[in-house]
Structure formats: C-alpha cells, structure tokens
Image (cartoon, rainbow, N blue to C red):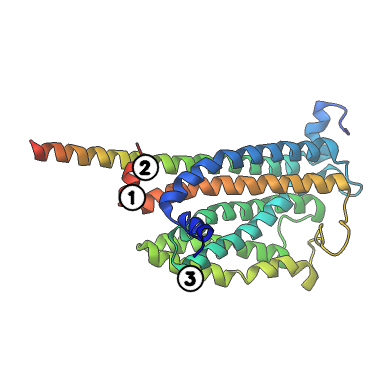
C-alpha cells in the first residue's frame, strides 16, 4: 500500500483524529464568522427590496441555507454511517452520530423559518404540501436516528442499527429536492437551477450563497466539537484517552 | 441602501415579526448548540480527570 493511503487510514483512528479535530475547529469558526458577517451585510444592506414580497422575502437568506444544510448533512451523515458499517471504522460512526443533532437543528430551522415566511405570503403557517411534509419527515428521521442510537446500550450495535436507518432514509432526500417538480405544490420552485440562469437578482444570489457557506462552516465546526466529546466518551477506557486529558 | 432610519430598518416594511423571528431563531440556536457541545466535552474531560485522580489515590494507598 502506498504511503499516502496509509496516512489517510491514520486519521481514521480516534487517537489521531481527536487532536486533529481540535486544531481544525478555530479555522472553521473563523470562516463561519467571516462568511456570516458578509452574508448578513448583503442580506440587509445590499440586497434590494423585492417587488412582490417587500422586505418579507429576506427570510430567504436563512431559510434556503438551513434547508440545503438539512439535506446535505443527512447525506454526509448517511455516508459516514455507511462507511462505518462497511469498514467498521470507529471514527466514521462517531462522525455520523455527531452530525445528527446539527442536521436536526437545520431541519428545525428550515421548518421554523418556512412557517414564518408562509404566514405572511400564503396566509398559513403550515400546509400539508409535498415539500413541507417531506422536510418534516427529514426532521423525524434525524430524531429517529438519535433516539435509536441512544436506546441501544452497546455502541457498536447502536452504530449498525443507526447506519441502516440512515441509509434507508436517504430515499427521502431526492423526494424533498424534486418535490416541487413532481407534485403541484404551494411551495415555489427551486431558486437556483443548474440548467438555467437563477431566477433572482445577482445580489440576492450572492447573499444566499455566502449565508449557505456560513451555515456550512458552522455545521463543520460544531460537529467537530461534538465528535471530540463523543470520542472521549466512547474511548474512555483506552490508554491514550487517559493521557489525552492533562 | 434602502433604509432611511434605524426604526425603518427594524420595522422591515411591516414584516418585523417574521423576519426577526427567523433570523433570531437561527442566531439563538446557533449560539446554544456550540455551548452545549462545549459543555459536553468539558464534562467528559472533568470526569476523566476525576477518574485518573481516583486511580492515583488507589495506587498510593496500595503502596503504603
């Protein structure tokens, strides 16, 4: 095996990932803050008032990033859980466990900001529309994953059961993504489409992308913080953990 | 910039409750979650330190 592949496997051990994660966290916080400040500046001071929705449309700058992250984190979580299931690597299962609460938070924010946007624009906090319902299911999938892992005492068995749940739940992600195309929904179509020019002003687009980057960096930072706690909790009886805390 | 006064900015063209309710909830949860993660890490570290102190005391008593 080549040297570089061995290097990668080295970081798959909790012992070397723990300090590495600790060194990366401040950089991700700095990036989250920088993107967040730039994104908020554009959201409130650069992006113009919308012709139809007035100032109410500004909710888009948190609603869309939260919704994107809720779907993306689920894919990353399922990837790590699946990798842990296939290769029996400990850090990947811990990473999946660490991502779930942040994903649930993003799904909750997506639903909350969506309700606050829906009320003034549609006249309803909630409708049983395909997009909203599938996002609610995503929120429950995160909660189910966390509850299932917490309910099984043996961590390795909990990892396996959680991984299967996470992988089966992936089917929901394309359903959320394409729901606005497949069904007639009240929810508007996607704002950004790979096939055609974005249906929004350039400044609005930039604000949204910067906020999405801020949410992304935030998610990495906070899940690295949590994975460090999980590593210590689960490896507490090993020799290296005893020396890791001075 | 489209705001003529601070009051106008906070009023958000009549959508103050919805806009600030959305941004406020995001800010609140994104402050609380890292604090909880940090507390979880410091709790496990504290308990590991206590455990090691207990082990050391054990060893001292046995050697006496």
Q: Which residue is mark 3?
A: A86
Rendered residue at 80%/56% (across/down): A122
Q: Which residue is mark 1?
A: A236
- Can I make out residue A238 in this image? yes
Rendering coords of residue A197 (x, y %): 88, 58
Rendered residue at 20%/38% (across/down): B56
Name the element at disc 3: helix
Rendered residue at 85%/37% (across/down): A46
Subunit under mark 2? A
Residue at the farthest right position: A51
Relative side of B16 to A79, left or right: right
Q: Earlier in the sequence, mark 1 or mark 2?
A: 1
Q: Are marks 1 and 3 on the same chain?
A: yes
Q: Which is more foreground, mark 1 or mark 3?
A: 3
Rendered residue at 56%/60% (across/down): A77
Q: Earlier in the sequence, mark 3 or mark 2?
A: 3
Name the element at disc 2: helix
Q: Which residue is mark 2?
A: A244
Rendering coords of residue B28 (x, y %): 61, 40
**Cα distance between the residues tagged 1 and 2:** 10 Å
Subunit under mark 3? A
- Can I make out residue A129 in this image? no
Q: Which is more foreground, mark 1 or mark 2?
A: 2
Rendering coords of residue A119 (x, y %): 76, 52
Relative side of A191 to A149, left or right: right
């Amino acid at each position: 095996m080549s040297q570089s592949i061995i290097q990668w496997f080295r970081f798959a051990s909790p012992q070397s990932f723990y300090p590495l994660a600790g060194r990366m966290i401040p950089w991700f916080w700095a990036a989250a803050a920088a993107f967040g400040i730039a994104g908020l500046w554009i959201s409130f001071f650069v992006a113009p008032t919308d012709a139809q929705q007035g100032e109410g449309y500004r909710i888009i700058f948190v609603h869309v990033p939260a919704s994107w992250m809720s779907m993306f984190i689920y894919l990353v979580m399922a990837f790590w859980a699946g990798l842990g299931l296939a290769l029996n690597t400990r850090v990947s299962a811990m990473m999946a466990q660490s991502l779930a609460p942040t994903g649930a938070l993003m799904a909750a924010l997506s639903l909350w900001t969506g309700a606050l946007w829906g009320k003034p624009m549609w006249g309803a906090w909630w409708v049983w529309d395909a997009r909203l319902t599938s996002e609610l299911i995503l929120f429950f999938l995160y909660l189910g994953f966390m509850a299932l892992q917490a309910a099984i005492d043996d961590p390795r068995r909990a990892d396996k059961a959680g991984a299967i749940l996470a992988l089966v739940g992936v089917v929901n992600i394309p359903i959320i993504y394409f729901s606005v195309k497949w069904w007639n929904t009240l929810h508007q179509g996607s704002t950004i489409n790979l096939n055609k020019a974005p249906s929004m002003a350039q400044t609005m687009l930039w604000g949204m992308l910067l906020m999405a980057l801020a949410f992304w960096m935030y998610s990495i930072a906070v899940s690295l913080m949590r994975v460090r706690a999980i590593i210590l909790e689960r490896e507490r009886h090993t020799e290296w953990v005893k020396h890791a805390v001075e | 910039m489209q705001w003529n006064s601070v009051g106008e900015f906070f009023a958000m063209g009549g959508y103050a409750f919805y806009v600030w309710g959305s941004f406020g909830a995001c800010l609140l949860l994104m402050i609380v979650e890292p604090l909880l993660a940090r507390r979880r890490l410091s709790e496990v570290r504290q308990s590991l330190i206590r455990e090691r102190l207990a082990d050391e005391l054990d060893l001292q008593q046995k050697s006496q």
